[in-house]
Amino acid sequence: MPLGIGIVCLILIALGLRPAIVSIGPILPDMINDFALSHTQASLLTAIPTLLMGLLALPTPWLSRRFGRDLAIIAALFLLAVATTGRAVSESATVLFVATAAVGVGIAIAGALAPGFVKESFPSRVAMLMGIYAMALSLGSTFAASATGILTDLFGSWRVPAGAWAIPAILGVIAWIHIERRGRKTPRLNTKISSSKLPVRNRTAWFVATFFALNNVMFYSYISWIAPVYVDLGYSSSSAGVILACFTLAFMAANPLFGAISRNEDRRLYLALGAAISLAGSIWIAVAPDVFPLVAISLAAFGTGGAFTLSMTLPLDNAKTDGEATAWNAFVMMVSYLIGATGPVLVGFLRDLTGTFHMPLWVLVAVSAAMLATTPLLQPYHHRQTAR
């Protein structure tokens, strides 16, 4: 696989994997009004896809073996495009949540299988390509965050921007059809993928999953609720959308930077740096959200984004083959996204309970502190074995 082709296709698939989630933030107040949802119910529009990203991580290796990794990715992206369109035209809360669940299925399968492609095709460039992949995820998020509010104002409805984000998923389908055709022309030599088991008894795998879970709680809580936080503070929907876009932009800027500077498989120093920056920004937002909000949001996002890039690399650092990478990635995603899904729901529940976002913001400070405390435990498994 030529590096340039691999990078382009990886970027195209990544661009479509986050807009269907991130675009909910700017239009969430309108959706709450249209469907008469509580804040806790509204949080499910982000929590359901995140939860499914965890639940479907386990069957993903089986899908890869049974139907082929590339065909599974193509089908998942097609489902994502259809479900995103279906959610935009839904007329009842039931249809809205069913379509949201289908969105989660598509994102879960495609997102779980893409890192295995990186490990198999470019084993010596894992950190760099995962940094590019994470940056493309963030670029899709940034575009969705900034454009959704503008499109809503332009069309006077949340439905048009909600459906527009099916387009990046369709582009991903086209890109991965090309990958699948190249794969048929060049059969893989590795036929022992099925022998790789989930690392459920590996302590390092649990540490990695815990760190990634805390990072996901931060990310999905912020993209779900940071715009409503500032609407509550008196900002317009467009201004709140700009603040959300600032979060995703800073998150994106950190992705390639942390991927480039972390060249050793023992990435604990840079993981701690990202977590510490995230903690500083989270404290700022909780203490004084109105004081230079763009700076505070950017700080929290930059640290979370840097930690996110390296979190996605950690399962690959502990794997030696494509099969092991798929198994480690499936396990880590299962644990981390199941826990990460609780973040938006907890924030929404506490907002309903207390009437403000003050307490939820301090909960995110605690989560960020826990993420920092976990970093010393993230030495790669085989490094620890060699030391012993």
Image (cartoon, rainbow, N blue to C red):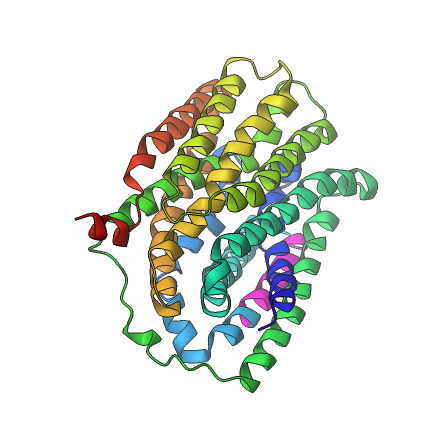
Residue 122 showing in the rendered view:
yes
* Relative height, residue 239 to residue 66 (above, below): above
* Relative height, residue 134 to residue 12 (above, below): above
The answer to whether residue 27 is magenta is no
Q: Residue at x 63, y 58 (%)?
A: 11
Q: Residue at x 21, y 52 (%)?
A: 385
Task: Looking at this view, name the residue that lies furthest to the left.
Answer: 388
Magenta span dominant secondary structure: helix
Residue 352 showing in the rendered view:
no
The tally of labels here is: 0
Q: Residue at x 66, y 32 (%)?
A: 246
Q: Position of residue 235 (x, y in %)?
A: 69, 22
Q: Position of residue 318 (x, y in %)?
A: 33, 55
Task: Looking at this view, name the residue that lies furthest to the right.
Answer: 154
Q: Position of residue 227 (x, y in %)?
A: 62, 30
Residues in magenta, as a range:
75-90
